[in-house]
Structure formats: structure tokens, C-alpha cells
């Protein structure tokens, strides 16, 4: 296997996609990147984490029969037929007036979305969250309106697998339904 791990446009060091953007336009940029690197006929396996699983669902639809398997990791937002646990609202780290307040916000956000036990959140996790948040330019609320999982996942012809952690925040007490 050959692993391609790319930033979604507007995340990390990647530039924002052309405005106005949508789930489809962002996924098409990702597909174009796969085509350029792996070739237009290359079979692909897609794994997407959280927001990336929604973009991955659109990519899998665009790539059609080339997709041999699609794995959604920690997916849950707007995935029809999958009960969702309403998570607390994220803390707006940009509102912090001091570095200490911003780090506290990042720590809380890691607790909300990533690590179920706050005692397991170390400074490295906070550093990673802070770095990723500072590099994120994409307005995911615009794209989330597309309900990517519900709109695209049921249409896929490839095998689909799901992975959730035991204390995954998007499913809360609903793990027994998985």
C-alpha cells in the first residue's frame, strides 16, 4: 500500500479553496490531488477522521468504482440512522486574552472532541490542538450544512467500515448501537 496523507484545503499549511466553496468542491480538490499523485485509474482506499470522514464520503462518491474501501473514523454528525450524542459547545480559544486562557480553551476542546478522560490530556495534546486550530482557515460550518455523511455514504458502492472509540464524544452513551 501507498499512504497519501494530505491536508484538507483550508487546514494545516494548505490554502483555502476558491470561494464560494462546498463539500463537493473541497472533495474534488482532494480527488484531483490523488489523481495527480497516484494516477487517474489507481484503486484507492479512503480513511477519514471526524470532519475528514464527511469529505471522504464525497470523495468516495466522486471516485466511484476506484474506491476499494472507505473507513469513517469518529463520524457521527448528521449520519442518518446513527444516534448522536450532543456534545458541549467548543470554547472559543480566540477569545482568550492571555496564552493561559487560550491553552485552557484548547485543553477543554480536546476533552470535548478527542480524549474522554481529562487526566489523559497532556501538554503535547494541547500543543497539537493549538497548532491545528491556528492553521485552520476553512469554515466547516458552511460545509457541514451539506450533511455529507447522510447525503453520500448511502450512495457508495464500495465496502464501508466505521470506527468509534469507546468514549467517542460524538456517540456518548450510544456505543451499544454500533
Image: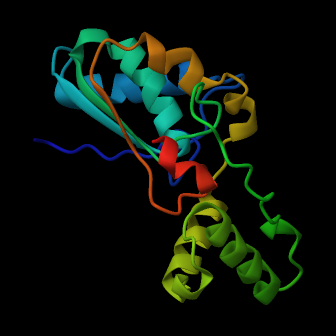
Q: Position of residue 53 (x, y in %)?
A: 47, 37
Q: How many marks?
A: 0
Residue 36 to residue 166: above or below: above
Residue 118 to residue 62: above or below: below
Point 49% across, 48% down: residue: 176
Point 21% across, 27% down: residue: 44
Check the image and name the residue furthest to the left: 1
Q: Position of residue 74 (x, y in %)?
A: 49, 48
Residue 98 to residue 23: above or below: below
For residue 66, what is the image quadrant? top left
For residue 93, what is the image quadrant? bottom right
Quadrant containing the N terminus in the rendered view: top left
Q: Is residue 131 left or right of residue 69?
A: right
Q: Position of residue 124 (x, y in %)?
A: 49, 83
Residue 139 visible in rendering: no
Q: Nearer the viewer, residue 30 or 172?
A: 172
Q: Is residue 4 left or right of residue 178?
A: left
Q: Nearer the viewer, residue 101 or 121?
A: 121
Say how the picture is coloured. rainbow
Quadrant containing the C terminus in the rendered view: top left
Q: Position of residue 32 (x, y in %)?
A: 36, 22
Amino acid at each position: 500500500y501507498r499512504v497519501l496523507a494530505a491536508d484538507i484545503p483550508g487546514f494545516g499549511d494548505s490554502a483555502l479553496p476558491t470561494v464560494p466553496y462546498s463539500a463537493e468542491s473541497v472533495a474534488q480538490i482532494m480527488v484531483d490531488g490523488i489523481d495527480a499523485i497516484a494516477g487517474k485509474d489507481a484503486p484507492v482506499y479512503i480513511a477519514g477522521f471526524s470532519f475528514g470522514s464527511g469529505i471522504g464520503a464525497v470523495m468516495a462518491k466522486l471516485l466511484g468504482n476506484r474506491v476499494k474501501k472507505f473507513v469513517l473514523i469518529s463520524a457521527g454528525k448528521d449520519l442518518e440512522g446513527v444516534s448522536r450524542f450532543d456534545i458541549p459547545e467548543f470554547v472559543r480559544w480566540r477569545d482568550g486574552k492571555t496564552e493561559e486562557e487560550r491553552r485552557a480553551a484548547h485543553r477543554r476542546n480536546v476533552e470535548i472532541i478527542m480524549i474522554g478522560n481529562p487526566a489523559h490530556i497532556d501538554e503535547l495534546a494541547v500543543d497539537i490542538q493549538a497548532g491545528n486550530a491556528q492553521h485552520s482557515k476553512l469554515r466547516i460550518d458552511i460545509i457541514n450544512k451539506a450533511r455529507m455523511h447522510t447525503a453520500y455514504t448511502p450512495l457508495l458502492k464500495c465496502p464501508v467500515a466505521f470506527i468509534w472509540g469507546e468514549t467517542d464524544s460524538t456517540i456518548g452513551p450510544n456505543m451499544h448501537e454500533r
